[in-house]
Image (cartoon, grey):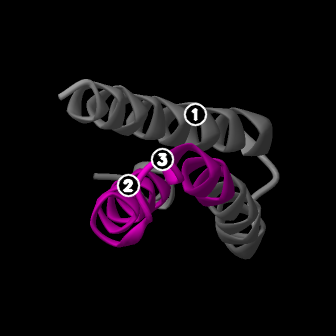
Amino acid sequence: MSWQWRSIVVVWLLALVFAVLVGLLSVAEQELAWIGLSLAGCTIVTLGVQIGTGRKEGYVNRVTVSIVGATIVLAAATGVFALIGLR
């Protein structure tokens, strides 16, 4: 795996960790607020990681793929929370 994909996958894994923590630690009916904060955290980490690579080439693409992937992970978690809440 190239360094570019590693810098992207790190953010996706962070989003997954945030989703699990939100599911375990948040108060019922408050998951959506914490998911939003998780996405904000993933965005800040994405910008930091991508600037930290020191590479200009492909910066916008790497940031876009990182944030879109984190959004997909957190959206899936939101869907799971909604299904659990239907019980």
Cα distance between the residues tagged 1 and 3: 30 Å
Q: Position of residue 25 (x, y in %)?
A: 36, 72
How packed is label 2: few (under 14 Cα within 10 Å), some, or many (20 or more)? many
Residue type at tag 2: Ala
Q: Position of residue 32 (x, y in %)?
A: 56, 43
Q: Residue furthest front?
A: 87
What residue did someone put label 1 on?
A: 65
**Residue 74 placement: quadrant:** top left
Cα distance between the residues tagged 1 and 2: 18 Å
Q: Earlier in the sequence, mark 1 or mark 2?
A: 2
Mark 2 vs mark 3, foreground winner is 3
Circle 3 sits in a helix, a strand or a loop, which is it?
A: loop
Specify start and end residues of the magenta stretch as a single range.
10-39
Residue type at tag 1: Val
Q: Residue furthest left?
A: 87
Is residue 23 in the magenta section?
yes
Task: Characterize the magenta stretch by its predominant secondary structure.
Answer: helix
Residue at the image position 72 percent from the left and 56 percent from the top: 40
Circle 1 sits in a helix, a strand or a loop, which is it?
A: helix
Residue 29 numbered mark, or none: 3
What residue did someone put label 2 on?
A: 19
Circle 2 sits in a helix, a strand or a loop, which is it?
A: helix
